Image: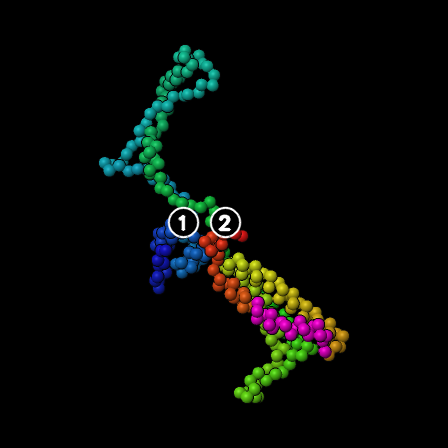
Amino acid sequence: MSTPLRTTYPVPVEDLIPAARQLAAELGTVPSRNRIMKEFRIGADKARTVLDALTEPTPPTAPQSTDGPAEPHLHAVPNLDQSAPGPESDGVGGEMPPAPREGASPQVTPHTDPVETAQSIPVEVVPAAVVDEGRPVRSWPVLLLALPAFVAVWSGWVGLGELTGFGVVHPLPGIADGFTINSAITLPIGVETYAAFALRVWLSGRVPAKARRFAKVSALAALGLGALGQVAYHLLEAAGVTQAPWQITTVVACLPVAVLGMGAALAHLIHAPEPTPETIRRPSENGEK
């Protein structure tokens, strides 16, 4: 890759264009404006100017002679229109060129060598279209969406946990007897955090296919369990129930273990290597299946 220009002073556009051309040659395509801004640490206006210079077509240059300026060779071009026979025919099928009028100069065209013309035109790889990535979409509005959802989800899971037997416990007996924690908070932390993590893995597109499939299924399952947990809590609260039925208690009690298992499995699949044709076991020649 090309070495970016590193300086504490603003670099002129004339000095950036050669470096940008070298970067385009290494990439095999014209870089985007954001890539130019990141590579050379310049602003958007200067990056746009450099990008315009890269995408402008280069005019062909005429070959120069070492002996001096070359003059074009001229030759006469007759009128070759043979669509209809005229009165001035040579008797074989072709027409005789019309005689030039008195005082008129013959029609001439510059004579150029096709090989020299082809060699004089510089070859430059220019893509059909330059994709401008533009500014990335900001993700900070997700925080505003998450705040009210966090309050509702947290209170719902904690309330459901207390209805199913979760409550204040002493996690460090004999070490810190005064330290207590409400075990009901493990439900929103475990279920909702795993759902967000699995969604990130599924939509990232940077993990093996098996990990993406597992993340997709488990993320949808975690979101579904979270929705059912919220519905169950509000229904029990509206009905004035102080102790949840055993069916709901059984499902809620198994959630921490299920979240731990899904998280460990997903972490293993993320770091597992992709299978190659050499690692795929094929049937042997003796008919083994």
Q: Quadrant of residue 214?
A: bottom right
Q: Which residue is mark 2?
A: 286
- Toward the viewer: 274 or 286? 286
Report the mark closest to the observer, 2 or 1: 2
Q: Which residue is mark 1?
A: 28
Image x and y of residue 199, in percent: 57, 63
Report crowding for label 1: few under 14, some 14 to 19, many 20 or more residues within 10 A (C-alpha): few
Q: Which residues are magenta?
A: 243-262
Q: Is residue 223 left or right of residue 120?
A: right
Report crowding for label 2: few under 14, some 14 to 19, many 20 or more residues within 10 A (C-alpha): few
- Toward the viewer: 50 or 276? 276
SS type, badge 2: loop
Q: Residue at 63% of width from left, 70% of height from top?
A: 149
Q: Which numbered tag is attached to residue 68?
A: none
Q: Residue at 51% of width from left, 51% of height from top?
A: 283
SS type, badge 1: loop
Q: Earlier in the sequence, mark 2 or mark 1?
A: 1
Amino acid carrying mark 2 in the image: Asn
Q: Quadrant of residue 190?
A: bottom right
Q: Residue at 64% of width from left, 68% of height from top?
A: 226
- Looking at this rendering, what residue extends furthest in the top direction? 91
Q: Residue at 45% of width from left, 14% of height from top?
A: 86
- Looking at this rendering, what residue extends furthest in the front direction? 286
